[in-house]
Each structure stands twice: as C-alpha cells, then as structure tokens.
Image (cartoon, rainbow, N blue to C red):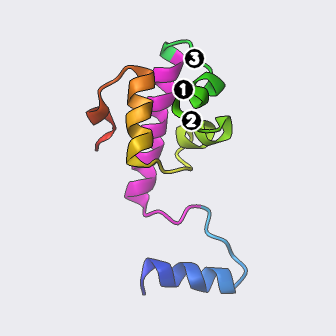
Amino acid sequence: MTERHVRVVMLRRGKVAQNPLPKTRQRYYKALGKMIAEARIGLLMTQQELADRIGLSRVSVSNIERGRQQILIHQASALADALKIKKGAFLP
C-alpha cells in the first residue's frame, strides 16, 4: 500500500493525516525551520520583517519555522540572503 493510498483510505474514513510527509522529511523540515528561526532571532528580526524581505506572509514564515510548510528553491535563496547565511546551509 502506497503512502498516497493510505492517505486516501484515511480521508474516506473521516481521518485526516496531520502531516502526510514521511518521518525523515518531517524531521528535515522541522530542523530547517528551527535553523531559520534561530538565525532570524539572532539578527533581532521579527517574523513580519523576514516575511517582508522575502515576499511571504508572516503566517507562512511561522509555518516554515514550525516545519509545517515546505519552501521552494527561490524562497530558500531569498531566506538565505535575508538571514545572511550560506544557501547550502539548507541542504541536508
């Protein structure tokens, strides 16, 4: 049974999966979010200031920092620039 199949079955049974990502991906995005939050706080920057610099909403920044939202490559590049860290730091 594939991961997608499991999600479809869960939805049919009225159960919604909290996070459909495999465990290793979940850990990656949580670790990435933690790194982003720590870098932002280290620069004394608010989530809103970071959001304004990278063209996302404050809610998106919050979700990224919590590992709930995946980021696109151009967003990762903008984040690295705004946080003054190497772009390769986001790679596992």
**In the depicted structure, whether residue 36 falls above or below residue 15:** above
Element assignment for label 1: helix
User: Extreme right residue here?
Assistant: 14
**Quadrant housing the C terminus:** top left
- Disc nearest the viewer among 3 and 1: 1
Answer yes or no: do the residues labelled 1 and 2 have beta carbons within 8 Å?
yes
Q: Which residue is mark 2?
A: 55
Q: Can you give x and y, in whole percent of width and height, for residue 62 in the image? A: 62, 37
Q: Say which mark, if any, is on residue 41.
A: none
Q: Quadrant of residue 81?
A: top left
Query: Left or right: 35 with respect to 49?
Result: left
Q: Is residue 22 left or right of residue 52?
A: left
Residue 79 picture quarter: top left
| Marks 3/2: CA–CA distance | 15 Å
**At 42% across and 87% down in the image, what residue appears?**
1
Q: Tag 2, which secondary structure?
A: loop
- Residue toward you, 70 or 78: 78
Choose the circle earlier in sequence order: 3 or 1: 3
- Residue hosting label 3: 45
Above or below, comparing residue 32 to residue 26 in the picture: above
User: Dot 1 corresponds to which residue?
Assistant: 53
Closer to the camera in the image, 71 or 66: 71
Q: Nearer the viewer, residue 45 or 56?
A: 56
Calculate the distance from the C-alpha at mark 1 to the C-alpha at mark 2: 6 Å
SS for tag 3? loop
Q: Amino acid at mark 3?
A: Met
Which residues are the magenta region?
Answer: 19-41
Q: Amino acid at mark 2?
A: Gly
Q: Which amino acid does the dot numbered 1 rest on?
A: Arg
- Does label 3 or label 2 sit earlier along the sequence? 3
Residue at 45% from the left image edge and 41% from the top image edge: 75
Q: Name the residue: 66% across, 34% down.
A: 58
